[in-house]
Image (cartoon, rainbow, N blue to C red):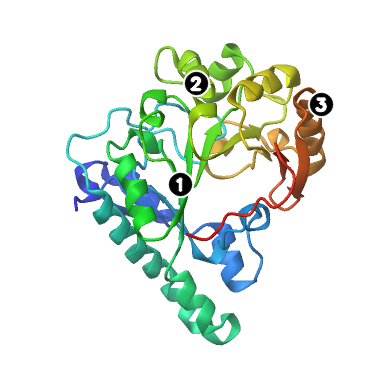
Amino acid sequence: MHNAEEYFPQELIAMFKRQQYKLFGHSAVKLCHWTKSAIYKGRPCYKQRFYGIQSHRCLQMTPSVSFCDQNCVFCWRPLTTFQKFPEKFDSPAEIIDEAVKQQRVLLSGYGEFKEQIGEKKLREASNPNNAAISLSGEPTLYPKISELIKEFHKRHFTTFLVSNGLHPEVLSKMEMPTQLYISLEAASEEMHKRVNAPLVKGSWQLLNQTLELLPSLKARKAIRITAIKGRNMSNEKEFADLIERASPDFVEVKGYMFVGYSRKRLQMGNMPLHSDVMAFAEKINKHLGYNLVDESKPSRVVLLSKKKGNLKIKPS
């Protein structure tokens, strides 16, 4: 296992520590707001409501913290990114071992509330069974991403992986996660450049290649649209056309939240109300014809599904 100091300057490491990340090598974990809420208040995140995962047992992690090939305006991290992944990197088993270990460190403070929380829930939280590979950076830049997913599955985790879609050559060959998310924040190349601020040439074409690839991938697939008021909540037909080509199982339309370093790039007025998100989702769906099956007002997210019925994931 490498040290974070081998990859990142001290000021960046200090910033991540202030934000309660646990860094190890080129990877990191952080307790999600909804994991903490599920543990202490019994209020889970929308993924539990929609898909049946247990929020208090979710491991929010990344194997590629600060390695990304986009500088999205809505991202909560500082735009201090590294495009080229280091030649020396940690193994999937090392990453998972350390991620679970650091998750337990982050949870250790909850021990004093054992009576309120319950010993069973605390024990379960210390043994996560869902990996949200989405914390920061682009996970498909990690050269062993396929092996990482396999290792998680070997340990009976379900896996949710969020990708910017700029690496179809990786997605086409890798082990599929339980649910694959592709971020789609733009309905045109011009909007893509403005909202996603790509750092690689031909990024719009690469994203479109991924959308074309999606129907052939054997996994549950979701398109996630981060809706930013005044930036991308328009061109509903063009969004629907792109989604139709990808033919995902689900479309999540989620409101941008005015948090973290995105506050240096956007304003409070760019954060839509839940009613705005719902209206935008309905306009897209008018051209798409999916089923509007659920919503979560606290998370400002609307779920469109190709099929009706039970959407819950079976435990591994």
Q: Residues within 10 Å of mark 2 (few under 14, many from 20)?
A: many
Residue at 24% x, 55% y: name it. 94
Q: Residue at x 63, y 62 (%)?
A: 44
Q: Is residue 285 above or below residue 65?
A: above
Give, as a three-letter code, the residue at label 1.
Leu
Quarter of the figure with residue 269: top right
Q: Nearer the viewer, mark 3 or mark 1?
A: 3
Q: Which circle's residue, 1 or 2, is located before the other in the chain?
A: 1
- Disc sitting over residue 135 in the figure: 1
Q: Residue 113 versus residue 54: which sits nearer the camera?
A: 54
Name the element at disc 2.
Answer: helix
Horizontal and vertical percent position of residue 166: 44, 24
Closer to the eye: label 1 or 2:
2
Q: Amino acid at mark 3?
A: Lys
Find residue 152 and report its horizontal and vertical position in percent.
37, 54
Picture disc at residue 202? none
Viewer-proximal residue among 220 and 20: 220
- The tag on residue 207 is 2
Check disc 3 and report the residue beneath it. 286
Residue 206 position (above or below residue 108): above
Horizontal relation, residue 186 to residue 103: left or right: right
Distance from Cα at disc 3 to Cα at disc 2: 24 Å
Write the residue at 54% across / 23% down: 211
How far across and how far down the image is residue 231, in percent? 67, 24
Q: Residue furthest bottom?
A: 115
Which is nearer the N-term, disc 3 or disc 1? 1
